[in-house]
Image (tube, helix red, strand yellow):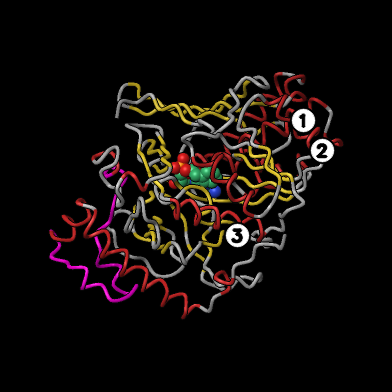
Amino acid sequence: MAMWQPEIESMPREELRKLQSERLIKQVNRMYDKVECFRKRMDDQGLQPSDIHSVDDLKKLPFSYKQDLRDYYPYGLFAEPLENIVRVHASSGTTGKKIVVGYTKNDIDNWADSLARMFTAIGVGPKDFIQVSFGYGLFTGGLGAHYGAERVGATVIPISAGNTHNQIQTMIDFGATVLCCTPSYAMYLSETIEEMGVKDQLKLRVGIFGAEPWTEDMRIAIEKGLNIKAYDIYGLSEIMGPGVSYECECQAGMHICEDMFIAEIIDPETGEVLPDGSFGELVFTTLNKEGFPLIRYRTRDMCSLIYEPCKCGRTHIRMHKPHGRSDDMLIIRGVNVFPSQIEEVLLKVGGDVTPNYQIIVDRVNNNDTFDINVEMNEALFADDVKSVDKTEKMITSKLREVLGIGAKVHLVNPKSIERSEGKAKRVIDKRKL
Ligand code: DLL
């Protein structure tokens, strides 16, 4: 079977822009006819589909929000009759009601294409055994990766997340060469492999990780721990699932499938489109989704886009790793804190502590309390109280430098913080805000 290599990824930008404009116009017309919420918003702004002539007019169009998915739950935003929907996925997030998305047969095909592009971009093909350790089910990770893996002709090991010892034994017995899971689960797997003393029995060479923020230092730790090259993949259920963007072999930002999605960066406060290269909120418009299309969807993910051509020759723009979500961002004593900043500090400190941590925020007498439990490693645990004290003080001062506010750092026993098989839960916010 030939490697799957679509020309669309190296399409000249002018042609790509033309394709985007054509698809945008078609999409806006379709949605105006079929999706009540979108039509109402257009009408409220005095806009007609005929006002949209090219991607330059995108900024005229109204935004859409996660709240819309809740308000029209479950199927109110679908743009196809339900008999044309062949699959639904859902995501519950940390708060509130589930959101539901639907796919037609073509949507599933395009989704598999985007993941096939990703696998091909990092040299994964028919000879590979891909262990899909993303959760299968309503979460998009498992089935998303699965269909892409089949499309490139690889052998899929559809194991889903969890049951870690069995997971590792299967990896060894079946000769998995590629691992797909969340970065926090990859860290957990790596830790358990170390404990089991089976690292030299693994055939893994590549890992594909996403669904939650992770830092460059975490990438280094995973690559070392599992002896692989680790690639980032991004996506969200509302837009499609994994594969909205993905890294190529250069590991220098994730290429957005621009024939399928238009990305914009906006100021999350004002909604204004920011100049190229700015850091802000990522907004996506789907260009060829049939079942569940969205125009200018506010992802709440904060990042910037890279417009310089990539060394790999793909012409599609790239996005930096999202720094966190504007709605994951904690405001503690008036200061913005992203959990990823804490992870960065811990990974830099390295040595005596692990990147397993939990943030606990509370409000006592109208003041925010900010505690961070950090797991120490076995060596420090066996050391004397003075060394623990010293490390605690060092982390506290490094965190203050980065965050600009003080946190109480508590070094806790090895393996005392619960491990995650999916997305890690790093924050316990007890304030009733
Ligand atoms: O997490 C889809 C996915 C599955 C992506 C597997 C990658 C791999 P949701 O559950 O809807 O969908 O969560 C989407 O997760 O808005 C981001 O905040 C975050 N996220 C996803 N990928 C990354 C990444 C899936 N590579 C939300 N880096 C998104 C940072 C990510 N954050």
From the top left corner, tell me how far across and down residue 163 is, in percent: 65, 24
Check the picture and name the quadrant holding the N terminus. Answer: bottom right
- Residue 137: x and y in percent read 50, 33
Whether tag 1 and tag 2 are in contact, CB under 8 A, the answer is yes
Tell me if residue 337 can be seen: no
> Which residue is depicted at the point 29% across and 54% down?
269
Q: Which residues are magenta?
A: 44-68
Q: CA distance from mark 3 to mark 2?
A: 26 Å
Q: Position of residue 130 (x, y in %)?
A: 69, 44
Q: Amino acid at mark 3?
A: Arg
Considering only order in the chain, which callout, 2 or 3, is on the residue closer to the N terminus?
Answer: 3
In the image, residue 165 sits, relative to residue 318, either above or below, namely above
Q: Earlier in the sequence, mark 1 or mark 2?
A: 1
Mark 2 crowd level (few <14, some 14–19, many ≥20, 10 Å Cα): some
Mark nearer the N terminus (3 vs 1): 3
SS of the residue under disc 1 = helix
What distance separates the C-alpha of mark 1 from that of mark 2? Answer: 9 Å
Inspect the image, locate mark 1, and give the three-letter code of the amino acid beneath it: Ile
Residue placed most toward the observer, 278 or 83: 83
Of residues 161 and 249, the one nearer the viewer is 161
The tag on residue 193 is 1
At x 73%, y 21%, the residue is 381
Would you name the residue on which mark 2 appears?
Answer: 202
Q: Which quarter of the picture shows residue 309? A: bottom right
**Residue 387 as seen in the image, left or right of residue 259:** right
Q: Name the residue that disc number 3 marks.
A: 117
Look at discs 3 and 2 and give the one toward the viewer. 3
Q: Are marks 3 and 2 in contact (CB under 8 Å)?
A: no
| 120 relative position to 70: left or right | right
Q: Secondary structure at mark 3?
A: helix
Q: Residue at x 71, y 63 (%)?
A: 2
- Tell me, yes or no, if residue 361 can be seen here: yes
